[in-house]
Amino acid sequence: QVQLVESGGGLVQAGGSLRLSCAASGRTFSTYSMAWFRQAPGKEREFVASITWTDGVSRIADPDEGRFTISRDKAKKMMYLQTKSLKPEDTAIYYCATRLRGSRTYDYWGQGTQVIVSS
C-alpha cells in the first residue's frame, strides 16, 4: 500500500502562483512514476504532469507547459507541482497519483487539494 497526501492548495488571484506538494508513504520502493491530475467542477479528471521516480524524467500537459513545473525529492518521498501565471480555468481539485513498476495505470491516489483561481 502507498499513501499519498496533497497539500498547498488555496485561493489565489489570476497571475499568481502556488506550490503543491504530495507526500508519499508506505511501500514507495516500487514506484515507477508519480503524476498530478486535476478535476474541475463538471469536468472529467485530466492529466497535468508526471515524473519518473528514478530518473526524474518529466512530462507536462501541453496547455500547462511553461507555467507548471513538476519535481520530486526522493529522499523526502515528496513530489511537487510549481505553478505560475495561474488562470481561472486552472481552478480544480489537484490529485497526486503513483504508478508502480509493471503497472499500466496509476495505482494509488491522494484525496486532492483544492486550487481556486479568482479573476
Image (cartoon, helix red, strand yellow):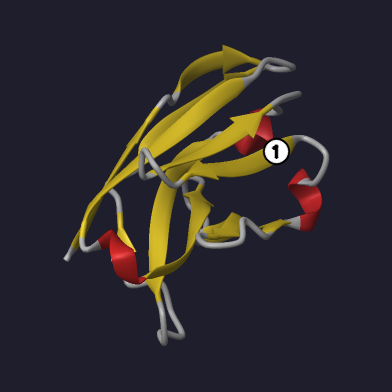
Residue at the image position 44 percent from the left and 47 percent from the top: 74
> Which image quarter: residue 81?
top right
Between 3 and 85, which is closer to the camera in this rendering? 3
- Residue 43 is left or right of residue 113, and the answer is right
- What is the quadrant of the N terminus in the image? bottom left
Up-down: is 64 above or below 82?
below
Q: Position of residue 4 (x, y in %)?
A: 28, 49
Q: Is residue 54 above or below residue 119?
A: below
Q: Residue at x 74, y 17 (%)?
A: 15
Q: Position of residue 80 (x, y in %)?
A: 51, 37
Which element carries disc 1, helix, strand or loop? strand
Residue bearing mark 1: 68
What residue lies at 67% left-to-right and 60% top-to-bottom?
Answer: 57
Position of 76 with respect to 36 (left or right) is left
Residue 23 falls in which quadrant of the image?
top left
Which amino acid, mark 1? Phe
Which corner quadrant holds the C terminus? top right
Q: Nearer the viewer, residue 40 or 12?
A: 12
Residue 72 or residue 103, whichever sits in front = 72
User: Is 89 left, or right, of 40 in this rendering?
Assistant: right
Q: Residues within 10 Å of mark 1 (few under 14, many from 20)?
A: many
